[in-house]
Image (spheres, rainbow, N blue to C red):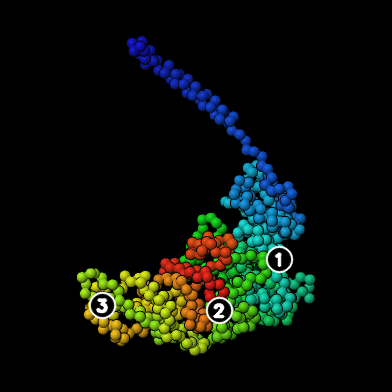
Amino acid sequence: AAPRLRPRAALMARRPELLCGAAILLGCAFLVALKVTCSRAKDVTMPAKLPVNFFSTRSPVIDLFRGQLDYADQLRQDSEIVLYFFYAPWCGQSIAAREEIEHVASRLSDQVLFVAVNCWWNQGKCRKQKHFFYFPVIHLYHRSFGPIEYKGPMSAVYIEKFVRRVMTPLLYISSRSKLLDFLSNYEPGVVGFFEFNASPQPPGYLTFFTSALHSLKKDYLGTIRFGVVTDKRVAEEISLVHSGSVYLHRHANTSLIYPKDIMNFTAENICKWALENREMLIRWLRPHGGKSLLLNNELKKGPALLIFIPYNPLEEIHPLLDEITKVALEYHKCNKSQAAEPDLQHVGDSDSPAFDSSVTDAHAKFSETFPIAKSPCCNTVVLPQWHSISRTHNVCELCVNQTLGVKPNKVHVPHCNFLEIEAALDSFYLQEHTFFQVISNTIECSNFLSFYSPFSYYTACCRTVNRHFLSFISSEKTIFQTPKVAFSSHGKKDNTQFSIPHIEDRNCFIPDLNISSTNITGLSCRTNKTLNLYLLDSNLFWIYAERLGASRSTHLKEFAAIVDLKEEVHYVLDQNQSLVGPTL
């Protein structure tokens, strides 16, 4: 075969046009084959199926499953309140929220128009005009104002609560008692005074109404409550004299009146002013279930008290939340601004059963701060020798120290309490390795906390002694002297080296010590380890409580824990104790 090809190769070498023609012919054959292959691939591609109803035909929700966004806009023109539910039919969250939306629609369909729009159908206008990064998405419109996006839990009670806030963004306050109830709430309150006698619609009223809708748009949790007063006598209770005045109520700081002479009276400015100056005693945390930095960002701000309670936002009375509010008010009550505040508080008044009268006095005398009370309990502890051939021991004097930040009345501290010294020993042995010394002639002292409290801590003073001194130590009482360790102005011990957690199996309070001695009034102003208070709905987020130490088998989903990221510790409230004011 080789001899036969040689003449042909020699011929192509003499005539190169033959070689080019062969290459062109092969290229055309390749293109034809490629075109046939691509046409076959198109033939086997199935078109997308037409969308079907996502909601039942008997549902009060209008289902625009073809993504007719233009028709949805037409429906909105004829309704005062409209809720849009944008969904993707394949999305698991959309499928789970469908039943919740139907439940809310069955209760509010006579007042609110519910419209569901398929935003995944590629031929629909919703898919072409909207570009959502997640599903489902809920938008609300109050007439021409909107959209107000709802970002809360996809639970019927929460969605209904938010819809009702959009329906009535202003609460009508008709009497002094209703004003008291409005201002005693833990959420910030903004009150506007408008006289309707002069005209059907006083100047500035629509602006104030729109500012309430702006606050819902910027703060989906709805933490600021807006109210309107029309009676001049009621308005005078909060120093509002002129119609069109706006008042921001704050519990622990001086309340404010909107500065019309500095800022223009617009809806955006009123909302911005209220959001920037609001006072947040308690914050709700509502993780959305996906990856989020919500908890991380809040815990980085400082030590946090996380309280889990079962919560129904549609209920009008929340006794447990009122108890927590009382604690928060006492904790943040500083006497600097109390004199400037009108006496209009239901929460935290002196006849409350949650606190002793000495604790809840609004004008408690911050006259004296005790450095350290006399140590009532001390115990000598002999640590094991560091080596079997060693003739030395480490001996420590362990003392329980009680301190008081405020002196409203005389406090009687027991001389010694077995449970206290037992708890001190438990905490001491958790870190006994830090007290080992080979040989040291000096006495070294350290302080460590019993639990997260500025009123109680332990002191351990250790030194090295020979074996034959042990019998002398047992009979001698004055070898160690507890050092005078004073509290600094911000409440931390000056020479504290360690801070470890301790979860006691028994009651967290000293049985013989009256609760009133643990005075938390104004404590947030006297320490730089101020606690941030957070609430979580245990019906939705109990999994977080379990990760913090809550029992899975408990029938009552109430739990409290303090988390301190900086110290890498957290403290758990005994679940056998009821979650009430004195316990907290």
The three-letter code of the residue at mark 2 reads Glu
Q: What is the quadrant of the N terminus in the image?
A: top left
- As drawn, the label of residue 330 is 2
The answer to whether 484 is drawn above or below residue 275 in the figure is below
State the image coordinates of residue 507 (x, y, percent, origin top left): 49, 75
Label 2 vs label 3, nearer the camera: 3
The three-letter code of the residue at mark 3 reads Thr
Residue at 30 percent of width and 76 percent of height: 382
Does label 1 or label 3 sit earlier along the sequence? 1
- As drawn, the label of residue 135 is none
Label 2 vs label 1, nearer the camera: 2
Q: Nearest the camera: 56 or 68?
A: 56
- Say whether marks 1 and 3 touch (CB < 8 Å): no
The answer to whether 520 is drawn above or below residue 502 in the figure is below
Give the structural element (helix, strand or loop) at label 2.
helix
Mark 2 to mark 1 CA distance (whole Å): 32 Å
Does label 2 or label 1 sit earlier along the sequence? 1
Residue at 65 percent of width and 76 percent of height: 183
The three-letter code of the residue at mark 1 reads Thr
Image quarter of residue 399: bottom left
Q: Nearest the camera: 369 or 121?
A: 369
Q: What residue did someone put label 3 on?
A: 464
Mark 1 to mark 3 CA distance (whole Å): 73 Å
The answer to whether 300 is drawn above or below residue 496 in the figure is above
State the image coordinates of residue 388 (x, y, percent, origin top left): 23, 69
Q: Nearest the camera: 401 or 262?
A: 401
Residue at 63 percent of width and 80 percent of height: 345
Q: Is residue 65 left or right of residue 443?
A: right
- As drawn, the label of residue 168 is 1
